[in-house]
Image (cartoon, rainbow, N blue to C red):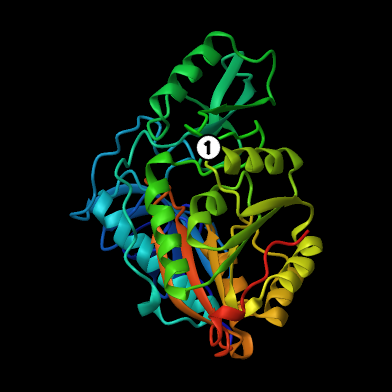
Amino acid sequence: MEAPAPTVKTGDRITVTVGDVAFGGEGVARAAGFVLFIPWVLTGETVEVEILEVKKQFGRARLVKILQPSPERVAPRCRYFGDCGGCQYQHLAYPAQLRLKRQQVADIFQRIGALDPLLVDPVAPCPQPYEYRNRIMVRSQWDKYKRGLNLGFIRADNRLVVDVEECLIAEPELNRQLTRLRAQPPPKGGIKVVLRLPPPGWEVPRDSFFQNNFHMLPELVRVVRGCLHRSQARFLLDLYCGVGFFSVELADAVEAFAGVEYDALAVQAARHNAAARQRANGDYYQGQTEERLPDLLRRFRPEATAVILDPPRRGCQPVILELLRQTRPAQIIFVSCHPATLARDLNVLTAEGVYEVVKVVPLDLFPQTQHVECVVDLRSRNERRLEDPGAANRGLPG
């Protein structure tokens, strides 16, 4: 049966009550059964909105006036909030941000992966909800109206660039770099400039990945280490390892480890990082994960091996998930900043009961924004995995 035609039209101004805030930050309301998405509103608020777009199943509206605000609404600290697309939640008190993100993660996992919401822990808070980003990308764009360059970030409502003098979620040093960039701007529009702080004590090539919140690194390591400890795995495979962050930090918890990374410069840096911390029980290998993984999984005893997956936002390639399903290492610790692609990949790993999700820990590496990091502990259903720990005596591949 087809849904009834919407009773609202573009340009209408109506009053609605926000029922929820969806992942991505838009509020969800209903008008005569018709779903509306509204930015910059909070759950429970009564608001006046103007209809901007009407489709068959849903519509979009802009906020005109807040008639009854949420008690959790706060004044945004940033003067660009609402124009700049970098933050979605500066108008929501930080404890409420954590509760909202936990609910969003649980909802996504239940909807996409049919996972029990009770498996999702409360979100681990960031000790510094502002001034935490150690990397930002600044864009330049010619503004024909002011006849000059805009230097800043993509707007929330289109692809134009908001001209910004500071970013309140960036480390103070990055704002000093931004000030210098604005004093000597790029020669034209269309140029992207990455401002970055090097992580203390780590070698990271210019274009290699590193977590963008130094303040949350201890908690991220603590959570992953806890997962590894509970499985009693004796070997560790660090896939998409970058400069070796996880395997270097966790090498003391296993007998041997190996890391795989496509970025050759990152592999060199990983080896240097491991040597600097006297991690001599492992090595790093350059290449595509799907090409290196079969040999590594043959050389490590699967029932005594944990695999850390920290893929790009788009998630894992199907061939990698299938290799893991076939070889069944005892544990997979999946680290992801994109709950939807994570839930999709978990669906594959847990199909036919091959793996079981035992714990999901969200961490707020991205305060004031829609993003959230998740660590998922998966265990193989193969009950033989640690029956004979003494047999796990093989070392690293050659």
* Residue toward you, 165 or 149: 165
Q: Nearer the viewer, residue 59 or 168?
A: 168
Q: Residue at x 38, y 48 (%)?
A: 218
Residue 142 percent location from the top left of the image: 64, 20
Q: Is residue 8 visible?
A: no
- Tell me where residue 376 appears, x and y as whole percent: 48, 69
- In the image, 299 versus 100, the foreground residue is 299
In the rendered structure, the answer to whether residue 265 lies left or right of residue 217 reads: right
Residue 388 visible in the picture:
yes
Note whether 257 is above or below 384 in the view shown: above
Q: Residue furthest top?
A: 183
Quadrant in the rendering for residue 22:
bottom left
Looking at the image, residue 379 lies above or below residue 10 = below
Q: In the picture, which quadrant includes the C terminus?
A: bottom right
- Based on the displayed image, in which of its 4 quarters is residue 382 positioned? bottom right
State the residue lying farthest toward the right. Answer: 291
Residue ID for mark 1: 155
Q: Is residue 96 left or right of residue 135?
A: left
Residue 228 x, y percent position in the rendering: 47, 67
Residue drawn at the location 78% of the way across and 56% of the way down: 288
Q: Is residue 275 positioned above or below 106 on the image?
A: above
Element under disc 1: loop
Residue 265, by quadrant, is: top right
Amino acid tagged 1: Arg
Q: Relative to 285, is 396 above or below? A: below
Which residue: 47% across, 75% down? 231
Q: Residue 17 location in percent, x, y?
A: 30, 64
In the rendered structure, the answer to whether residue 263 lies left or right of residue 164 reads right
339 and 11: which is toward the camera: 339
Answer with left or right where residue 325 lies relative to residue 203: right
- Residue at 43% over, 22% down: 173
Mark 1 neighbour class, 10 Å CA radius: few under 14, some 14 to 19, many 20 or more: some
